[in-house]
Image: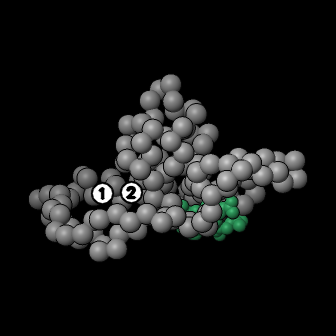
């Protein structure tokens, strides 16, 4: 779930990259990648889907820099609902179905992740 919400940001609100450090009301917005989830200094090979990247020694650092639902008083209202939904979906998918790739699946990245030709699969119930 963490790797899904890291790599597929559905909130395309960050379109720009800061070229130099910017000071705002005593805070520093550091220059660098437009999305912390794609910062190669934190997430090695950031465009690779790798659910096993959260090793014991990196877990705390990666979780501190994982904020798909924002934070503070503007934290997404649907965060827990969405995590529950993803967990249920994955559980039912892998325990009750098998699937076959039909077509599509090419990934296009602008600020968010997109599948221009969609991704077609055929689901087959397990018995
Ligand atoms: C994977 C799914 C979702 C992601 C990644 C996501 C992400 C976000 C993000 C990044 C924000 C902005 C937080 C900020 O301003 O700092 C936000 C706000 C919000 N989200 Fe979501 N969201 C998701 C699903 C949902 C769902 C399912 C609902 C409703 C049932 C929802 C309701 C809201 C609301 C109402 C806000 C505004 C909160 C406020 O301004 O106080 N979101 N979401």
* Disc 2 target residue: 88
Q: Residue furthest right?
A: 25
Q: Residues within 10 Å of mark 1 (few under 14, many from 20)?
A: few
Q: Is residue 69 left or right of residue 9?
A: right
Secondary structure beneath disc 1? helix
* Mark pair 2, 1: CA separation: 6 Å
Residue 20 screen position, x and y as percent: 71, 50
Residue 54 found in image quarter: top left
Classify mark 2: helix, strand or loop: helix
Q: Is residue 78 visible?
A: no
Image: 5 above or below 119: above
Q: Position of residue 119 (x, y in %)?
A: 27, 69
Q: Residue at x 48, y 66 (%)?
A: 110
Image vertical order of residue 45 relative to residue 69, above or below: above
Q: Badge 1 is on which residue?
A: 92
Ligand 1 shows up in which quadrant of the image?
A: bottom right
Residue 16 spot, x, y in % from top left? 62, 63
Q: Quadrant of residue 102?
A: bottom left
Q: Mark 2 vs ligand 1: CB under 8 Å?
A: no
Q: Residue 116: give its label.
A: none
User: Which scheme is used to colour this image of the protein?
Assistant: one colour
Quarter of the picture containing the C terminus is bottom left
Q: Residue at x 24, y 69 (%)?
A: 104
Q: Is residue 55 above or below residue 79?
A: above
Relative horizontal placement of residue 117, taking residue 57 as reference (left or right): left
How many marks the image carries: the answer is 2
Name the residue at 43% across, 63% down: 109
């Amino acid at each position: 779930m963490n790797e899904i919400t890291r790599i597929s940001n559905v909130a395309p609100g960050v379109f720009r990259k800061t070229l130099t450090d910017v000071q705002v009301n005593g805070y520093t917005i550091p220059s660098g990648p437009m999305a912390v989830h794609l910062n190669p200094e934190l997430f090695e090979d950031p465009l690779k889907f790798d659910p096993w990247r959260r090793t014991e020694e990196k877990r705390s650092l990666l979780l501190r820099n994982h904020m798909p639902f924002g934070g503070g008083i503007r934290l997404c209202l649907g965060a827990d609902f969405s995590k529950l939904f993803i967990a249920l979906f994955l559980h039912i998918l892998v325990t009750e179905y098998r699937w076959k790739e039909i077509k599509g699946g090419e990934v296009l990245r602008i600020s968010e992740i997109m599948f221009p030709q969609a991704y077609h699969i055929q689901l087959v119930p397990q018995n």
